[in-house]
Amino acid sequence: MPISGNIKRVEYRIAYIAMCVQNSDIGRALLDDLSDIPAIDPAYIQFGCAEWFWETYPNSYVLQVEPDIYNTKDRVSVDYKEALHIEKIRNKFYGVLNKLIQARLKSSLYKQ
């Protein structure tokens, strides 16, 4: 986001990761790890599954970054200060997710 004192509102488009997870020990361990990510900021990060999506894609889950009060919307208008907060949370979210994936990849390489 640009640093500017004259921006009043920002259109925010949801940041999310959707995935299908194998029903296995590794898949369940991954779900446990992913379910911890909302602890970064529970008011802005949600983890779960959309019923309509599950019907087509069983074992599907989503992690999304969006103010909880708008968790069913794809885009919302927020004030500039909140947009800066969302950006900060989103960046942390992707950083934690990247570390988790790297750790899982590294651990799976040692198991081969």
Image (spheres, helix red, strand yellow):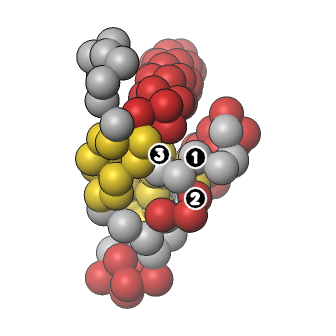
Give the percent coordinates (x, y) of residue 8: 34, 37
- Contact flag, marks 2 and 1 (Cβ < 8 Å): yes
Residue 30 image-quadrant placement: top right
- Contact flag, marks 2 and 3 (Cβ < 8 Å): no
Asked whether residue 27 is in view, the answer is: no
Residue 18 image-quadrant placement: bottom left
Q: Which residue is mark 3?
A: 65
The numbered dot on residue 44 is: 1
Q: Which residue is mark 2?
A: 68
The residue sitting at 41% across, 48% down in the picture is 78
Q: Amino acid at mark 3?
A: Val
Q: CA distance from mark 2 to mark 3?
A: 9 Å
Left or right: where 110 falls relative to 6: right
Q: Amino acid at mark 1?
A: Tyr
Give the percent coordinates (x, y) of residue 16: 37, 48
> Label 2: few (<14), some or many (≥20) within 10 Å?
some
The front one of 27 and 6 is 6
Asked whether residue 61 is in view, the answer is: yes
> Label 1: few (<14), some or many (≥20) within 10 Å?
many
